[in-house]
Amino acid sequence: MIELLNTIAYYFQKEYVIFATVVGILIALCSALLGVTLVLKRFSFIGDGLSHVAFGATAIATAMNLTNNVLLVLPVTVVCAVLLLRTGQNAKIKGDASIAMISVGTLAVGYLVMNLFPSSSNLSGDVCATLFGSISILTLTDTEVLICAVLSVLVVAAFLLFYHKIFSVTFDEDFASATGNRAKVYNLILAVIIAVVIVVAMNLVGSLLISALVIFPALSAMRVFKSFREVTVCSVITSVVCTALGILISIVASTPVGATIVAVDIAGFALFCAAGLLTRRVKA
């Protein structure tokens, strides 16, 4: 045990470990804030769709040799988030169909671009790293950490500023519109925030595992708590703890960062399910 603690202390003297932990916690915080709303609105799959969009945009940015992929990936993902919202409200193209259409299309285009304009000789490694995350979270620069911090602060500020509006739109969009709230505007704000979170989270878990950061903490909190505020707070705490623990395990055990974080989230979900079951039996 002492040897393990010494190993952990040694790694946390490294700047890259501190950067990875800070960015991971910020991403976990933002993902959990949105996760509850997305799950309740049955929009959980939109994160997966936008992550595929981000993959395609990243492939194009890499082919263009852009020094900062975010300059292209962020606006493209935001535009697609708005398109998903618009097409999802179209009677001819339902929400799930529009998500599938855009996500599959951008994933295919991204892989095609990576084949036509490979950035290295190890194409399969590049694809795997982009889809499932890589050691890029451990090689973050000061600029990348700053960008992540600024975007995270904007996401949290937007959520807190529009908390009551998001709450009303989440549970009864028609009633919110009838009482004078501009539901479409707040749905649009949600879509933009989701896109920002997806782009920021790509370095941490890769494009295919981003949905786990959004879904698992929210579902875990819902096993025990019932009110929107309680579920949101519990979801944030659970997400931050699981992400920090996942990063720590991945560093010490030399396992993939993204997959390790998701595995910890799954374990957390199992614990919350057990706690919820136990609580219901005690009350009965």
Image: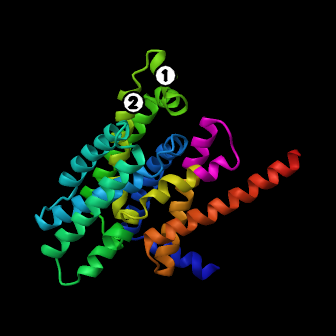
User: At 47% from the left edge and 26% from the top edge, which residue is drawn?
Assistant: 165
The kind of residue on which mark 2 rests is Tyr
Q: Is residue 169 visible?
A: yes
The kind of residue on which mark 1 rests is Ala
Pointer 1 or 2: first along the chain? 1
Percent across and percent down for residue 70 are 22, 54
Percent across and percent down for residue 201 are 37, 57
Q: CA distance from mark 1 to mark 2?
A: 10 Å
Q: Residue furthest front?
A: 92
Q: Is residue 175 above or below residue 56?
A: above
Query: What is the magenta range?
Result: 219-236
- Res 186 label: 2
Residue 186 on the magenta span:
no
Q: Residue furthest top?
A: 179
Are there few (<14), some (14-19), or many (20+) residues within 10 Å of tag 2?
A: some
User: At 50% from the left edge and 48% from the top edge, which residue is drawn?
Assistant: 32
Percent across and percent down for residue 103 are 32, 57
Secondary structure of the residue carrying tag 2 is helix
